[in-house]
């Protein structure tokens, strides 16, 4: 009796396995990949493969990473997103919110699949999203109004440490007005490097830089790439009145951001960064499409080639 029951169970099991194989073989390859991704802990990747579209959150305005040109969104991050979508065999949809601060809530809520926005990797952000390895290494630097620096008695200073030391010694550090962009990393970081100074937030990068140009702020703290590109694009008005310090004072790293619970997707993106962006020199290739740059191998950053910066 037991032998007959086992035999019947074995036959039933074989039938179920055969039926499962038939059903699975009928599933299109992309859906099969999606199911596999979901089973392995990547629901976002599963959704991408099933929908056939990769939704990428990008910075609304951060040249050369994301900006509008001739009515079309372009930039380094846009090119990276297109390459990733091509590798995945899906379409790409770029999503630019009204403000940079909306991007993390968007990826957390599933409104975009991944953020590629020149976003600095910070501990506070890593508490709510997962970051990839850096795809771009840069640093926080300083845009200074030359006339304002002279009035503060630090006209010849070209680095953050000396600037703070001399202003402390003269008792003028509390008079220093530091422009930052509201909601971005420098707003939180600047008080640590300029204790006692006046930290003044502005609604956009451009507004903060304009404040320095007009003398409404003494310096702006932001990513060196933005500061150099802004000075490059506004050279006619700004190159004799402002300058970017020669070297960043704090390392900064940009990463892609993904919703928590998608580590397999993060691992895949890390491979993409290593094998498709770094090994093939894609970042420099994409940068050169929008601004003239040369690589600095020592810091893996970039300098704009035009001689507007007095030593850059």
Image (spheres, rainbow, N blue to C red):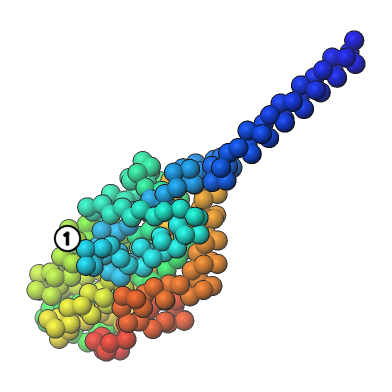
Q: Is residue 297 above or below residue 119?
A: below
Instruction: Place residue 283 in its image quadrant.
Output: bottom left
Number of numbered discs present?
A: 1
Residue closer to the observer: 19 or 65 = 19
Q: Is residue 178 above or below residue 9?
A: below
Residue under the image location 22 percent in, 52 percent down: 98
The residue positioned farthest toward the top in the image shown:
1
- Residue 51 % position (x, y): 44, 44
Residue under the image location 56 percent in, 42 percent down: 28
Q: Would you say 145 lies left or right of 122 here? A: left
Q: Residues within 10 Å of mark 1 (few under 14, many from 20)?
A: some
Q: Would you say 221 lies left or right of 78 here? A: left
Q: Is residue 175 visible?
A: no
Q: Secondary structure at mark 1?
A: strand
Residue closer to the observer: 28 or 96 = 28
Residue closer to the observer: 51 or 132 = 51
- Residue 275 % position (x, y): 55, 67
Name the quadrant of the C terminus.
Answer: bottom left
Name the quadrant of the N terminus.
Answer: top right
Residue under the image location 55 percent in, 49 percent down: 264
Label 1, on which residue?
A: 202
- Residue 120 % position (x, y): 37, 61
Q: Is residue 286 above or below residue 309?
A: above
Q: Would you say 279 lies left or right of 111 here? A: right
- Residue 145 % position (x, y): 16, 78
Residue under the image location 39 percent in, 73 percent down: 286
Q: Is residue 157 visible?
A: yes
């Amino acid at each position: 009796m037991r032998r007959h029951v086992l035999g019947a169970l074995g036959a039933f099991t074989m039938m179920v396995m055969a039926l499962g194989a038939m059903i699975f073989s009928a599933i299109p390859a992309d859906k099969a990949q999606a199911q596999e991704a979901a089973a392995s802990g990547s629901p976002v990747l599963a959704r991408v493969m099933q929908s056939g579209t990769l939704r990428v959150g990008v910075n609304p305005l951060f040249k050369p990473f994301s900006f509008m040109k001739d009515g079309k969104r372009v930039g380094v991050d846009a090119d990276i997103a297109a390459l990733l979508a091509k590798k995945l065999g899906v379409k790409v949809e770029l999503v630019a919110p009204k403000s940079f601060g909306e991007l993390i809530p968007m990826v957390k809520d599933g409104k975009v699949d991944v953020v590629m926005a020149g976003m600095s990797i910070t501990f506070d952000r890593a508490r709510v999203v997962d970051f990839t390895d850096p795809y771009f290494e840069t640093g926080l630097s300083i845009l200074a109004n030359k006339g304002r620096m002279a009035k503060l008695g630090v006209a010849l200073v070209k680095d953050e440490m000396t600037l703070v030391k001399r202003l402390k010694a003269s008792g003028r550090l509390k008079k220093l007005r530091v422009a930052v962009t509201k909601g971005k990393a420098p707003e939180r970081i600047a008080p640590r490097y300029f204790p006692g100074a006046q930290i003044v937030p502005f609604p956009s990068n451009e507004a903060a830089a304009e404040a320095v140009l007009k003398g409404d702020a003494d310096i702006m703290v932001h990513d060196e790439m933005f500061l150099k590109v802004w000075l490059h694009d506004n050279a006619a008005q700004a190159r004799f009145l402002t300058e970017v310090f020669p070297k960043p004072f704090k390392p900064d790293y940009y990463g892609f951001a993904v919703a928590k619970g998608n580590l397999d997707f993060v691992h895949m993106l890390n491979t993409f960064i290593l094998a498709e962006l770094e090994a093939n020199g894609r970042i420099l290739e994409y940068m050169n499409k929008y601004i003239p740059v040369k690589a600095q191998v020592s810091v893996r950053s970039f300098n704009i080639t035009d001689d507007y910066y007095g030593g850059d």
